[in-house]
Image (cartoon, grey):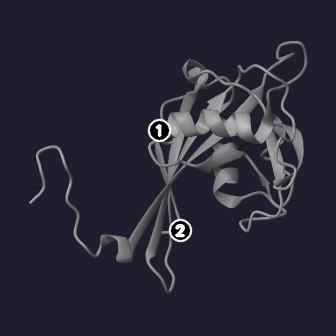
Amino acid sequence: MAEPGEHRYRDDVNSRVRLVAAAYLLLVQTDGVGGGREPEVLLHLRQHTGYRDGHWALVAGHVETGESVVAAALREAHEEVGVAVAAADLVSVTTVHRTVVGGGPIEQRVDVFFAADRWSGEPQVCEPSKNAGLRWWPLGQVVAGLPEPCVPHELRVIELVAAAGWPPATWAPGAVPAVLTHGF
């Protein structure tokens, strides 16, 4: 019997279902907005990771043991592109619930997307073994086409943000749904 405050799960949960949490960060550059330049989102080109190598992607990573999704987003910003983002500057964008059903356990993923338009430091490639380069993409050109290929579930979120406009305070209710699903 579980002690008060402890959780007890069925013994077969780990063999049947696996849930993986990840944090994603849209770094949005707004310098010059109003002065002729539209907001831009930072993407990096994945390489040698074993997942979507050769695809453009957002700053992102798995939540580590004992870490909150907010802490993971801040850590990944520093590890991947060398910038420091304050937790207070994160804007919650959406959560994507993804699944992949295959021969093994049912794999489910919960991807929490944040955005920030304030940080310290200049974005740079900090993990050259995993990142083949960085590029800023104007949000207004997202509908016309981001670089190909782009990680599909990330592209969907970027397209919603682009359609809703920047900053998030201007979003109409439901413009970016609180929860999206992918693979169901």
Q: Residues within 10 Å of mark 2 (few under 14, many from 20)?
A: few
Query: Residue at left 81%, top 22%?
Result: 121
Tell me whether circle 2 and circle 1 mark residues in contact (CB < 8 Å).
no
Query: Residue at left 91%, top 18%?
Result: 36
Q: Position of residue 184 (x, y in %)?
A: 47, 69
Q: Residues within 10 Å of mark 1 (few under 14, many from 20)?
A: few
In terms of secondary structure, where does tag 2 sit? loop
Decide which of 43, 180 is in the foreground and name it: 43
Q: Position of residue 152 (x, y in %)?
A: 69, 60
**What number is the disc on residue 167?**
none
Three-letter code, disc 2: Gly
Q: Position of residue 69 (x, y in %)?
A: 50, 40
Residue 11 vs 60, above or below: the answer is below
User: What is the residue that sits farthest to the left in this orientation?
Assistant: 1
Residue 37 seen in the figure: yes
Query: Residue at left 47%, top 49%?
Result: 65
Residue 119 vs 48, above or below: the answer is above
Decide which of 46, 101 is in the foreground and name it: 46
Q: Quadrant of the N terminus?
A: bottom left
Q: Nearer the viewer, mark 2 or mark 1?
A: 1
Label 1: which residue?
Answer: 68
Residue 35 vs 100, above or below: the answer is above
In terms of secondary structure, where does tag 1 sit? loop
Label 2: which residue?
Answer: 183
- First in sequence, mark 2 or 1: give its number: 1
Residue 21 lies left or right of residue 2; in this view the side is right
Decide which of 60, 157 is in the foreground and name it: 60
Residue 24 lies left or right of residue 118; in this view the side is left
Q: Position of residue 38 (x, y in %)?
A: 84, 25
Residue 175 seen in the figure: no
Separation (CA) of disc 2 from disc 1: 25 Å
Three-letter code, disc 1: Ser
